[in-house]
């Protein structure tokens, strides 16, 4: 029984278009012929309407779909018997639409699975911090000075006080520009209201929280090195030091 149910889907896929097409031909269903003629006109009109559109779905699904269906219509135009012509078109339309939809869904699902696997690899398997050795965010970043290490000499560009307030120290006076609270949330305090821009988790990973999903953009290791993780390899861009 289970084997029969597993084979039922493919059997229905290949048999239903043939059954419908054969029914139109053998029973001479004029309504189906008339309806199909209106569908053919709609296909040609929609194909012309989508010709200049460059949207992703239009370009890679609807335009190929309409192009294939209209080609089937053109190739079957020479069949003189209207019922035979309609039956062939119905079966061919259903087969083509079903196969293209299956392939498109397979590609979309494959891409989604690939993105999930890559996220799992980079966020979980490549996370080199263990829960037993992680220090709280407050201990990791507070009461430190931030140095820019991208140049030949390290340059102090900021500091974080004991309350998590972040200061820009490149000017004549230190200027408060943000705050990192005890939960690691990074806030921009330069506006009228504080605005969350990111967060630092307990492993030291830095996340951008301004989008729909949190995005890992950096990491602070146990030595205070600040790394940019948006590229293929992590890149040192700064250092937090308790001077």
Image: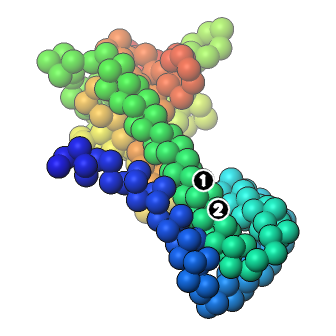
Label 2 vs 1, first from the N-terminus: 2
**Mark 2 vs mark 1, CA separation in Å:** 12 Å
Name the residue that disc number 2 marks. Answer: 92
Vertical placement of residue 121 versus 233, above or below: below
| Residue to which mark 1 is pinned | 100
Q: Which residue is painted at 52% across and 72% down in the image?
A: 20
Observer-nearest residue: 60 or 35?
35
Residue 138 visible somewhere in the drawing: yes
Q: Position of residue 50 (x, y in %)?
A: 78, 68
Compared with residue 116, is residue 12 higher up or lower down, i.e. above or below?
below
Residue at 51 percent across and 18 percent down: it is 234
Q: Is residue 120 left or right of residue 110?
A: left
Q: At 53% across and 65% down in the image, what residue appears?
A: 17
163 in relation to 196, above or below: above
* Drawn side of residue 1 relative to residue 72, left or right: left
Can residue 195 be seen? Answer: no
| Callout 1: SS | helix
Circle 2 crowding by C-alpha within 10 Å: few under 14, some 14–19, many from 20: many
Residue 12, image x, y percentages: 41, 59
């Amino acid at each position: 029984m289970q084997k029969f149910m597993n084979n039922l889907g493919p059997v229905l896929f290949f048999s239903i278009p043939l059954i419908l097409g054969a029914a139109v031909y053998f029973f001479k269903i004029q309504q189906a012929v008339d309806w199909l003629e209106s569908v053919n006109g709609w296909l040609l009109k929609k194909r012309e309407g989508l010709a200049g559109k460059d949207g992703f779905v239009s370009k890679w699904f609807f335009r190929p779909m309409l192009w294939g269906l209209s080609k089937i219509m053109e190739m079957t135009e020479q069949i003189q018997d209207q019922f035979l012509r309609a039956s062939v078109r119905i079966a061919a339309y259903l087969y083509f639409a079903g196969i293209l939809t299956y392939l498109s869904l397979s590609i979309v699902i494959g891409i989604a699975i690939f993105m999930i696997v890559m996220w799992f690899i980079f966020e979980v398997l490549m996370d080199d911090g263990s829960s037993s050795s992680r220090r709280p965010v407050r201990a990791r970043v507070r009461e430190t000075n931030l140095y820019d290490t991208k140049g030949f000499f390290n340059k102090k560009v900021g500091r974080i006080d004991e309350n998590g307030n972040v200061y820009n120290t490149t000017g004549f006076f230190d200027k408060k520009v943000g705050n990192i609270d005890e939960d690691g949330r990074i806030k921009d305090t330069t506006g009228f209201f504080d605005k969350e821009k990111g967060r630092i988790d307990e492993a030291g990973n830095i996340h951008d929280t301004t989008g729909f999903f949190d995005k890992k953009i950096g990491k602070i290791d146990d030595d205070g090195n600040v790394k940019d993780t948006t590229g293929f390899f992590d890149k040192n861009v700064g250092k937090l030091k308790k001077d």
